[in-house]
Image (cartoon, helix red, strand yellow):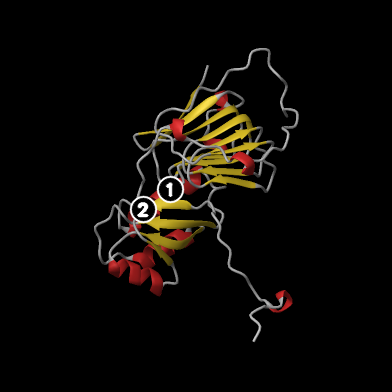
Amino acid sequence: MSLNVDRDSMAFTFKGGMLPMTVMELTSADPERIREQLASKLSQSPAFFQHTPVVLNVEKLDEPHLALERICAVCRAHKLLPVAVRGGPDPVKQSAWALGLGWFPPQEVSRPRPLESVVADGDAAEHEPAPPSESPESTSEPVLPDAPPGTTAGGRIYRGTVRSGQQVTAPEGDLVVVGAVNAGAEVLAAGSVHVYGALRGRALAGIHGDAQVGIFCRELHAELLSVAGNYKRLEDIDPRLLGTTVQVRLSDDQLGITPLS
């Protein structure tokens, strides 16, 4: 019997993928406290709460009998859609499955390695010529510094513009974009993200949880910035920083944006 399958008869195919997800890290198991904080967040950033899928991270909780169903109901009432749970003992895992949610084991953060060991994709790296800059040239352009210690190995270099609807990832290290990232585009890296052009889309660094990495860009107009799951949207960014050369780093679990000279 032939093992070949007629493509016209196939109803689906399995494909691997890396999708950016918002992680809601719970430090309280009290649904009412969660409700109060979500109501406050909703008033501050209503655009974020538009049926956004979230992963509930319960690694910091010591609650074997978590009121997971009530917490999920609170999230849905505020237009957040829980899709999975990360961490927790076996009763939490069983509860997640019973509610139709996925379950992820606790996250392991690999030790960072120095940037000197970063290897570009070589022949696999993109060689699309970078188009003209979308913003007027300035007479003196700040130079982005060498990536700081704490970045990871196995990086990727992308040459050209990342266009709207396009996603470029570096799942094992730093991502360097020699060009612009347009609005509606997305760049993700396990390590740091470096954009040698205008950053107008979404940039996510430390997607596996490494809090020592950062985002560095030539011209900041980002729709969203995220480092190790801590994020800021465009409306949360100081308007004085827009259009400038900046670095984005975590400090005391807070996302900080500082200019680079």
**Nearer to us in this view, 208 or 5:** 5
User: Tag on residue 74?
Assistant: none
Q: How many marks?
A: 2
User: For the residues marked 2 and 1, what is the alpha-carbon distance in whole angstroms?
Assistant: 8 Å
Question: Hey, which residue is sitting farthest right in the picture?
Answer: 132
Does 225 appear above or below 14?
Answer: above
Q: Quadrant of residue 250?
A: top left
Say few, some or many: other residues with alpha carbon within 10 Å of mark 2 (under 14 / 14 to 19 / 20 or more): few
Q: Which residue is the site of mark 1?
A: 208
Name the residue: 64% across, 87% down. Answer: 1
Label 2 is placed on what type of residue?
Gln
Q: Position of residue 83 (x, y in %)?
A: 47, 63
Mark 2 = which residue?
107
- Is 151 left or right of 121, judged from the image as shown? left
Residue 17 position, x and y percent, is 56, 57
Q: Is residue 246 left or right of residue 101?
A: right
Q: Secondary structure at mark 2?
A: loop
Residue located at (41% from left, 32% from top): 114
Where is residue 70 drawn, in percent x and y? 37, 65
Q: Secondary structure at mark 1?
A: loop
Contact between labelled residues 1 and 2, with CB atoms less than 8 Å apart = yes
Looking at the image, residue 122 sits to the left or right of residue 207; the answer is right
Identify which amino acid the numbered label 1 is placed on. His
